[in-house]
Amino acid sequence: MRALVTGCGRRLGFYLCEQLVAAGWQVTGSYRSERPELDRLRDVGVELVQADFTREEEVGAVVTALAAHEDLALIIHNASAFEPQAADPAVQLAQFDQFYRVHMAAPFQLNRALAPALARQPNGGIIHITDIYIHAPAPQFAAYVATKAGAHSLAMSFARELAPAVRVNTIEPGPILFLDEHGDDWRQQVLAKTPLAREGGLEPIWQAVQMLMKNDYMTGASIRVDGGRALAVI
């Protein structure tokens, strides 16, 4: 079986590629920018495709790469763009366009093109990685949150359209892995409002992926993997 993981250049996408390979999957990963660490994925057999998801033709290159295989059984939409909303309205519009293309347009294009291949498998699945904040919009991240919420809605639409041949679900991460620029004070503020009071790490997301693939009676479902953080923000 083959999985496509988008946004595999670092953090969660990189980790999911490693775990899928270890579990016996063939893996194709898309990434935007070349990094030395990607050689680790190449060394374990991951097929890598460089693609800027703000460009329709580069998303198409991922589809073309997968056309050479007949074993696609899973898509994990992990590619993401994130930054605070700019003060300049013109820049805000550019940000919104970027987030829309990465979080919504590219997954729509991939789902539409690859659904027939998934449907040929006995347990074809699509997983969209969204965010717990789709339920609690934050003004300083308006474009990011709105397009992640759009990704959720897109997933639900595909869950209805592609059933029963393909199952479509979402995972909503919370504070699983802080960014380097997150200071200690900010981290402590977040964890103080997280019932489990700790950073989750990447493994809980992998556990959720495994559960969604093993449980073949789940579609249109959303799983929060957030240590209870949503209880404080929703």
Image (cartoon, rainbow, N blue to C red):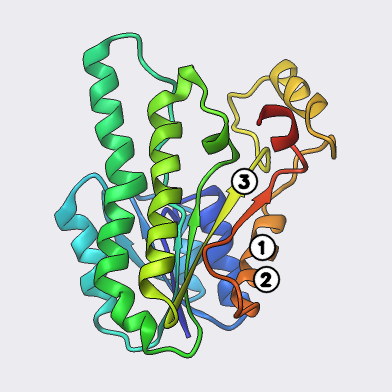
Q: Residue at x 42, y 83 (%)?
A: 165
Q: Nearer the viewer, residue 38 or 163?
A: 163
The residue indicated by pointer 3 is 173
Q: Are marks 1 and 2 in contact (CB under 8 Å)?
A: yes
Q: Residue at x 28, y 53 (%)?
A: 106
Q: Nearer the viewer, residue 12 or 88?
A: 88
Q: Is residue 126 left or right of residue 202?
A: left
Q: Is residue 112 left or right of residue 134?
A: left
Three-letter code for the amino acid on which mark 3 is drawn: Pro
Q: Residue at x 24, y 80 (%)?
A: 67
Above or below residue 200? Residue 190 is: above
Q: CA distance from mark 1 to mark 2?
A: 5 Å
Residue 33 can be seen in this image: no
Tell which residue pokes out farthest to the left in this image: 57
Q: Position of residue 211 (x, y in %)?
A: 67, 71
The residue indicated by pointer 1 is 208
